[in-house]
Image (cartoon, rainbow, N blue to C red):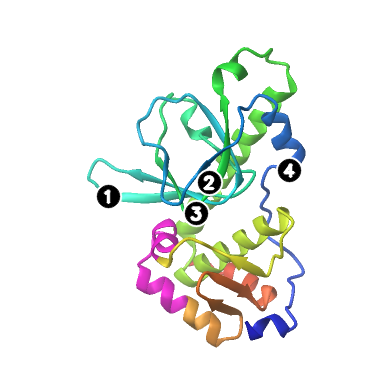
Amino acid sequence: MDVLRKVVKQPQQEEAFHSPSLSEVEALSILSQPFFTLRKKSILVNQGDPFHGLYIVHCGMLKQSHQHKDGTKLLTHFYLPRDVIGLDAIGDRTYTGTVTTIETSSLCLIPFSQIEDLPTTDAIHMQLLRCLSNAAHYGHTRLRKILSQPSEARVASFLLTMSHKYRELGYSSNFLRLPMSKQEIANYLCMAPETVSRIISQLQQRGLLSVNGHEYCIVNQEGMARISEHTKYA
């Protein structure tokens, strides 16, 4: 893309968003089984399946969707490398949503029985508590944004969140390859697909974003951050 030749402006401040560090994931991975690979559009677990363990994403991307009793589906999570799948299933011992690969992905399973057998003072238990705390914080933050932000701010926040995650994984925070569709992004943000497409086009017209298929370039992170701070009640 021509935009690769442009100078990309960086924001002075970034929203706090943290994936588990490599050392934290390695602490949990001590108990994991060997990595396995799932092809694109493969189901990892179905909603309602008995909980048998946690999964750590090694590479690729997955999504989790929850189907309500009235038949409506809500996309609740995107999982990237180093993310832990299944934390929301520990309490009820059933997986709360269907997890599907968006692209070919590699994962490893941590049987929960192995964690339960460890002393409660073990470092792995502490790391699991940190993961649970981070997951709860992320869920609350996402809900707050959906309730308080206008559509444009939600899209900008989503792009910045993905940008921060990519940077923590060691990739560029400006050039993102997002394999999910705009329909999936819209479902995740509780918006209409047409609204997401319109906002992305507007961000491009304003020189903040460049898009080529599944490749997104945040040209002006500072400007994108200003948009993401808007609220319905400002």
Which of discs 2 and 4 lies nearer the camera? The answer is: 4
For discs 1 and 2, the disc positioned in front in the rendered view:
1
Q: Earlier in the sequence, mark 3 or mark 4?
A: 4
Per the model, the C-alpha gap separating discs 2 and 4 is: 21 Å
Image x and y of residue 179, in percent:
51, 61
Q: Upstream in the sequence, badge 3 or badge 1?
A: 1
Between the C-alphas of marks 1 and 4, the distance is 35 Å
Question: Label 3 to label 1, Cα distance in Å?
Answer: 24 Å
The residue that label 3 is drawn on is 103
Q: Are marks 2 and 4 in contact (CB under 8 Å)?
A: no
Residue carrying label 4: 21
Please tell me whether mark 2 sits on a helix, a strand or a loop.
Answer: helix
User: In what element is the residue under mark 4?
Assistant: loop
For the image, the number of numbered tags is 4
Assign a secondary structure to mark 1.
loop
Q: Is residue 107 visible?
A: yes
Give amino acid for label 3.
Glu
Q: Which of disc 3 and disc 2 is earlier in sequence?
A: 3
The residue beneath circle 2 is 140
User: How many neighbours does mark 2 have within 10 angstroms: few (below 14), some (14-19), or many (20 or more)?
Assistant: few
Please tell me how crowded label 4 is: few (under 14), some (14-19), or many (20+) other residues with Cα within 10 Å.
few
- Disc 2 versus disc 3: distance between alpha carbons? 27 Å
Q: Where is residue 98 shown, x and y percent of the image?
A: 39, 41
Q: CA distance from mark 1 to mark 2?
A: 21 Å
- Judge the density around disc 1: few (<14), some (14-19), many (≥20) Cα neighbours within 10 Å: few
